[in-house]
Image: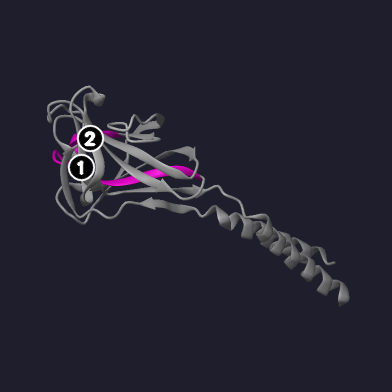
Amino acid sequence: MNIKILKAAIAGLVLSVSGFANAGLIYDNGPAIADSRRCAETSGTCNGTWTLFDDFIVSNDSDITSVTWTTNLYGGLGDYNSSNIWFYDNDPVFGSGNLLFSYSDAGTTVANALGGNFYDITLSGFTETIMAGTYWIGIQHNTTSNYATVAMSGTSVNATQWQNGGAGARISSQPELAFRINGNSTEVPEPSTLAIFALGIMGLASRRFKK
């Protein structure tokens, strides 16, 4: 069999298998439709520090590499310092969720179509591997002296909020938050799928030998 044909066949198999990585969007909780008017910041302007939580579903075992959400920075970009996110296996406010991962950094900001001081913030630079299932994300902004909220994507369902790291008020039935989870699925093709790829290569080799 011509070595070039064999290389091409193997490359096709590798590319096909790697295609199952499904890089990109893992979960989308919906676009921002309005300000939730729920504090998620550290300045103390809201009578303490506040964090908002909402659940998300991962359909396949995945590597999460970034999170994007929409915020309203009442003090403008000049009041924004960085962001904090947390992943839990359940609602930490009312469901005794266990902390799985946390990350803090200055996110990239892009003006949102809602106008004013609405921005899409993306936090990246990390990789967190999680199994398929339901999880909860916590979102908070490090602000200097003003309010910061997370925009809503829908009416109240099961998002929650706490004050001072859970030591203060705990509030249920908050508006659904506008956020997206991005990354890569880590599941591999089933054996039957791999067998189909292998048969394809064998067929190609057979045709070459017949010639």
Give residue 162's position: percent from left, percent from top.
22, 31
- Is residue 30 shown above or below 123? below
Give the residue displayed 63% in from the left and 56% down from the top.
17
Give residue 89's position: percent from left, percent from top.
40, 35
Give residue 141's position: percent from left, percent from top.
25, 34
Give the residue displayed 57% in from the left and 58% down from the top.
19
Residue wearing tag 1: 174
Residue wearing tag 2: 161
Residue farthest right in this picture: 210
Give the residue displayed 20% in from the left and 42% down from the top.
174
Q: Is residue 195 left or right of residue 211?
A: left
Question: What quarter of the picture does the N terminus occupy?
Answer: bottom right
Do callouts 2 and 1 mark residues in contact (Cβ within 8 Å)? Answer: yes
Give the residue displayed 47% in from the left and 38% down from the top.
127
- Helix, strand or loop at label 2? It is strand
Secondary structure mostly taken by the magenta-highlighted segment of the chain: strand
Stretch in magenta:
62-83
Give residue 91's position: percent from left, percent from top.
32, 35
Q: Residues within 10 Å of mark 2 (few under 14, many from 20)?
A: many
User: Marks 2/1: CA distance?
Assistant: 7 Å
- Is residue 19 shown above or below 166? below
Q: Nearer the viewer, residue 130 or 18?
A: 130
